Amino acid sequence: MSTLVSHPISAADRSGIGPRRGRGSSMRTWRWSDRLLLLAAWAAGLTLCAIAAAIVLYMGYRGIQYLSPELIFSRPQASLTQAGSGGFLDPLLGTMLLTVIGVAIAAPLAICSALWIVEYGRPNWLARVVESGIEIVAGTPDIVIAFFGLAIFQLHLLSFASETAEGGGVTGRSFLAAGAMMSLIALPPIFVTVRDGLQTVPSHMREAAFALGKTRIATIRRVLLPGVRSNIATGVTLGVSRIIADTAIVIVLLGSTLRISPQPGGAPVLGVLKGLGSTLTSYIYENSPAGEGGAPQKAYAAAFVLMLFVLALNLVVERISRAQARSSGFVTAVEGIV
Amino acid sequence: MSEFQQLSQAPPPSTRGTRPRAHTLRAHTPHADDPPEHATLSTSPFGTDHVPPVRTIVLDRPPEPVRPPEQREALRPVAGAAGPERLRLEDVSVSYGGASTLGRRGANAVRSVSLSIHQGEVLALIGPSGCGKTTLLRTLNRLTELTPGARRGGQILLDGEDVHDLEDTALRARVAMVFQQPNPFPMSIFDNVAFALREQSRRRPRRPELEPLVVDALRRAGLYDEVADDLHRPALRLSGGQQQRLCIARAIAPRPEVLLMDEPCSALDPISTGVIEELIHELRRDLAVVIVTHNLAQARRVADKVAFMYLGDLVEYGTADQVFEEPRAPRTRDYVRGAFG
């Protein structure tokens, strides 16, 4: 091997052109700790892959085993036998309803606060307070948010938003209450992605708009918001996946009625919003051995559907960010001239 | 290529010598009376045979300047050919930062600059880095106000009105700006230009009403022939030089009176630079142009008047010939000869 040194080096090698890669350092010269770290890194990565694959495969196997169309399209029934207790149409609809309510509240809030932080953000101390406020919300466990929500919506002031008992007592539980608290779960990811998107918009883009005689708000509306569209989409998708995966808020604020049960005597839509119901997550909980149902087959089927949702959302996020990297974003505007 | 060579190598005597003709033309033509009438170059009231040669641009190959740089050098007009005064600066000073830095020398980025800028002429601001050229330029349309802590003294008059009394958005539509980096918005070519036109009028003009204005602006910026086939493709797909001309089109679309250019060619290759320099020549008939440049050769090629700044002071101001050939201040002489900067 030592004769290698005396070999004439071709021009291609010297200039670094050509398919041959240069010789890397041999692992034999490495310290033991370095070798161990490399080994640990590989092992950790592969283990996580294996765990993820195990979850997907096991849930897929169980799901396909137990899932049937009538489970998806039939409502849960109160019954003593498993054969008579129906499917999970209501939890499915409940998940969708809760997602819509949560995102409808969270998206405008998150986008506007990101805009304020990045584009205005004055006075500085207030901006810092707002940002750490959102960080606190992001770091609060969902069960805490759920109990906080229960406390709030039990106030008589907010009795319009939740189911009222016959004697006039406010339960503090409803789709509206759960959706409002869900929006707190969805808000941080939307806020962070939109804020980061706005921060990557180069400042000369804003200056260009100002120099054309545009106001700051016109610049935001016509240049910045269209520019961060894909960030908004990514953030909303992440928020949606947080909402559909959450259990604690549902159990505390939506109750454990598996069927969607509108507030008696209410208007058709408002009655549902004020009423109780369930989601896929609470359905899984109730039917699992931990809950009262003790119907693990149905829990598996619902879990499979839930997992498909989450996987699909992950795929969407991936797609959006890849399309963003490919399409003509702000980054390309800079690269284009260099 | 062949057209270009024919034009530059063996032009008929009548189309050569554009500069003297442009000069005489300027001498007996009313200038700024009615800019909107100059809809396009070809319908200029000067008549087609008086118009300086328009670039011939053919698709599928890079645009070429009509005249190579050596000839462009000879294009500079003679002093005194300018039109009415557009901007007048009186004792303009700009400082950045809080009170703590005020006591130090050099806290003023620009100190007591007085100038006047006329339609029909190109004023080049030259000077070493950090001398306040760009600050001065950005003060003219009050963009410096966006920098926290920036303060301005003195007066800037746009057609006799103090710019301080104008609404900033209205001012910036009249004093347009092109930046160092081409910065088209991530939308279509059409929308880029239309954006400049749209929200200026309260009622949103519709697309058919905007179309002729957009086309006109693109034509004046010499970009229309290259993009005419598809105005709705993304602006960011254009080349760097095309993007910069799009930015110029966007800036001149609302028919401003003054065009500020902050090193508009420093991010471009020589061919695109040549195209833009040509464009500046043509634009100045309707506009007053102020250009900041580090490139002395470029200042020599495009400018009618030159202002040399050093450490925030206006050291010398005069016609390009005078500043480059017989500079009065020793510092200017050193700078234009390349002794420093």
Image (cartoon, rainbow, N blue to C red):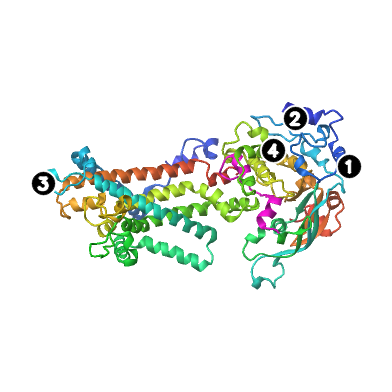
Chain to which the residue tagged by mark 2 belongs:
B
* Mark 2 or 4, nearer chain start: 2
Q: Amino acid at mark 4?
A: Asp
Residue at the spot of label 3: A81
Which residue is more in the foreground, B286 or B185?
B286
User: Residue A76 bears which disc, if any?
Assistant: none
Instruction: Answer with left or right where residue A194 lies relative to residue B218.
Output: left
Do marks 2 and 1 share a chain? yes
Instruction: Answer with left or right where residue A335 lies relative to residue A246.
Output: right
**Image quadrant containing the C terminus of chain A:** top right
Give the Cα distance between marks 3 and 1. 103 Å
Q: Which stretch appears magenta?
A: B166-194
Q: Quadrant of residue B128?
A: bottom right
Q: Percent x, y for residue A141?
A: 31, 61
Give the Cα distance between marks 3 and 4. 78 Å
- Badge 2: residue crowd in 10 Å (few <14, some 14–19, many ≥20): some
Asked if residue A56 lies in the magenta stretch, the reply is no
Residue at the spot of label 4: B216
Q: Are marks 2 and 1 in contact (CB under 8 Å)?
A: no
Q: Secondary structure at mark 3?
A: loop
Give the Cα distance between marks 2 and 3. 90 Å
Q: Amino acid at mark 3?
A: Thr
Q: Nearer the viewer, mark 3 or mark 1?
A: 3
